Each structure stands twice: as structure tokens, then as C-alpha cells.
Amino acid sequence: KGVFRPTNPKKYKGDPNNVIYRSSWELKLMLYLDKHPEVVQWSSEEIVIPYRSPIDGRLHRYFPDFYVKKEVNGRIETLLIEVKPKVQTRPPTVQKKRTKKYINEVMTWGVNEAKWKAAKLYCEDRDWKFVLMTEKELGLA
């Protein structure tokens, strides 16, 4: 966890002096986005998407990890990116024993699934793409 200082602050949408990373994985992606020539604009946790939690049935706010606008072959493409360990991108294996750990995994999965469904709809409405990035996509596995 820490503060990231972009070397290309003009590419950052938001306050380039207040860019927070929560993991070394997010830091790795920030370094890439800051330096990659195809990335025209990016931000971290600046987009807010409402979603309904399956846990309490109430509306909550989801802040996807990254907003990225890039130019590829003269075409602009916009992405929302969520960085997660691969193990958290699929439902937990059903357990016979309902341990606290298992119940927590099921609840986390339910909330994540609701967030990602809302993000996909948000992106579809804008002709953007929603992407989950794991250790594999980040070159860490």
C-alpha cells in the first residue's frame, strides 16, 4: 500500500498527487499504464457504479480499480479493470462444513459477482469493456 507518483501526470484523470495503490499488483499495473504509449488516459478508483448487494439487498457503491482509455490503430478503446487474485474470480468450492472461512468466501463471491455484473452493464451502456485481471494477466503467475 502506498502513493504512486505518475511520471506522466497529464495522462492521469483526477488528482495525480493522490494516486493510491492497495497492492503490489495494482502498483505494477499503474507503472504500465503510466508509461505505455497506447494509454491516453487512466485513473484509479475514480468511477462509481451503484450495485445491489445480495447480502443486505441495499444499494452500495463500487469503485473499479482502473479506468483506462487507450488508442489502438487509431481507434479509442475504454476499459474498466478490476485486479483480483484468480482464486477470487470464481465461486468457492462447496464445503460440507460451513466454517466461518467458507461462509466469508461465499459472501465475498456474492458481493463481487454483483459488483462485476453492475460494471459489465455500466460498460455495455457506454461501449466500454470490463476486464478482470489476475496474477496471470499481470505476468505474476
Image (cartoon, helix red, strand yellow):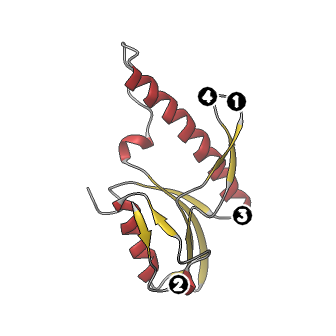
Mark 4 — residue? 55
Q: Earlier in the sequence, mark 1 or mark 3?
A: 1
Q: Earlier in the sequence, mark 2 or mark 4?
A: 2
Pair 2/3: label in front = 2
Which residue is tagged 1? 57
- Separation of residues labelled 4 and 1 (CA atoms): 6 Å
Q: Quickly name the residue at label 3.
A: 126
Mark 1–mark 3 distance (CA, rounded to whole Å)? 26 Å
Q: CA distance from mark 2 to mark 3?
A: 25 Å
- Which quarter of the image is occupied by the N terminus? bottom left
Three-letter amino acid code at disc 1?
Gly
Which residue occupies the extreme left position in the image?
Answer: 141
Q: Can you see residue 73?
A: no
**Among the 4 quarters of the image, the one containing residue 25:** bottom left
Residue 76 seen: yes
SS type, badge 1: loop
Mark 2, residue position: 9
Q: Amino acid at mark 2?
A: Pro
